Amino acid sequence: MKANMITIAELKQKIAEIKSQLEADLIQNLAKEELRIKFLAKKGLFNELAKIISQVKPSDKKETGQLLNEVKTEITESIEKSTKSSSDSKNKWVDLTAPGIKPKTGHMHPVSQAMEEITQIFERIGFSRSRYPEVDWDWYVFESLNMPKNHPARDEWETFFIDAPTDKKMGKVVLTTHTSNGQVREMERLESKPPIRMINIARCYRRQQDATHTQMFHQFEGLVIDKGINIQNLKGTLDYFAEQFYGPGTKSRIRPFHFQFTEPSLEVDFSCHICHGTGFLDDKTETPEDQRQKCKFCKSGWHEVGGAGMVHPNVLKAGGFNPDIYTGFAFGWGVERTYTLKEGLNIDDIRLLYSGDLRFLEQF
C-alpha cells in the first residue's frame, strides 16, 4: 500500500468529524447561506473531503462513492431543515410594542349558531333544553305518537330502518324522522309530573334530498304540558319566537292541518321580513294588485315554517298523563329552514350549509 493511501476506516473518521462540525453549527443557528458556503461550496468541507477519492484503493472506490453520496445528502437535508435565513443573521431592530399577528381562527357553523340562538330565546321564557336519542325505538318515534302501524310515515321509503333485532314491545330501531320522539321520553323522565316546558334540538333523518330537503337535518321541538294549557298559549309562544328570531314586527299565523300526534293540528307561518307580511314591495295600497310589485322572496307575505298543535290525548296517555286533567301544546320544524328565512341571507338551497365550502361558510 502506498504511503498516502486512505483506508475506509480513515474516511469514516473524517466523515464523522464533518458531521460533528455541522451539528455544532446548527446548534449555533448559523444562517443557511453560511452553512452552504462552509460545507457545500467549491472550497467547502465536503468538496475537500471528496478529493481523497483518488487516494483510496481501487477496490474501495465503490464503497467510498456511496459513503460520500450519503454524507452529501445528509448535509444538504440538514441545511434545508435549518430555520434561520441569511437575512435573519443580521441584527434587526424589533419593536416589542407593536401588535402581534392574530392567528386565523374559525367560528361556529351557521346551523350551530342558529341552534344556540333558538335555545337562548326559549330559555328566557322558562323552557329547558333536553336531548333524546337520534337512533330510537319505533315505539317512541311512531307508536307512542298515535301513529298506527300502517301509517305512511312508517314506510321504508320515508324512514331509515336499522338492521337490528326487533323488540316485542318497542318494535324496530330507526333513525328518528322528527324530534317528537322526545315528547313521551320527557314525560317519562319527569315521571308524569307537570309542568313540562321542553325544547329539544337534534338531528333527524328522512329519505329526501333536494334544494329544500337533506337526508340529515336538524329540528327543534317545543313541548308544554300543564293544567289549562290552550291554543292561546301556543299562539303567544309562536309570536314571541317570531319577534325574537326575525325581529320586531314579525307575526305568526296558524292554519288548520293534520298530524297524528296533535289535535287540533296547525301549520305555522311567519310574516315575511322583506314585505312585512303584505306580499308587495310598495306601499301603494290604492293601486290594483296586478299592477303592484310583488315580493319575490315570499310571494304571499308569509313563509311556511312547520307544524304545531295541542298534544293528542293518546300521546298524553302514552306518557302517563291524564288528558282529562292536563293539556299541552307542541311545535317543531327544521332549524335549517327557520334559519334560511332570516333577513339578508337569501339561501335558496339548504344543501349549501353542508357543502363544506369555506367560501360559503366564511360569510357567516
Image (spheres, rainbow, N blue to C red):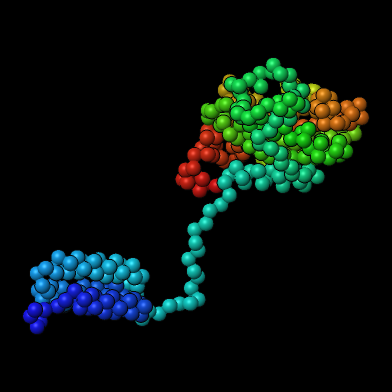
Above or below for 202 versus 79 = above
> Which residue is more in the foreground, 316 or 101?
316
Question: Which sits in the foreground, 357 or 186?
Answer: 186
Whether residue 230 can be seen here:
no
Residue 244, picture quadrant: top right
| Residue at screen point 74% across, 44% down | 129
**Residue at far bottom of view:** 3
Residue 59 place in picture, x, y as percent:
11, 68
Query: 47 or 251: nearer the eye?
Result: 47
Q: Residue at x 10, y 72 (%)?
A: 57
| Residue at (47, 43) in percent of width and height | 357
Q: Quadrant of residue 268?
A: top right
Q: Which residue is at 73% across, 21% downward?
A: 147
Asked whether the viewer can see residue 176, the reply is: yes
Point out residue 165 in the picture as x, y percentages from the top left corner. 65, 28
* Most distant residue in the top direction: 150
81 up-or-down from 121: above or below = below
- Would residue 299 appear left or right of 167 to someone viewing this image? left
Picture quadrant of residue 44: bottom left
Q: Could you tell me residue 306's position as x and y percent?
A: 68, 29
Residue 200: image location, x then y, percent = 72, 39
The mark total stands at 0
**Whether residue 242 is situated above or below residue 257 in the rendered picture:** below
User: Outermost residue, right direction?
Assistant: 325
Q: Is residue 32 left or right of residue 150?
A: left
Q: Given the current orientation, which residue lies at the most extreme front position?
A: 1
> 61 and 343: which one is in front?
61
Q: Quadrant of the N terminus?
A: bottom left
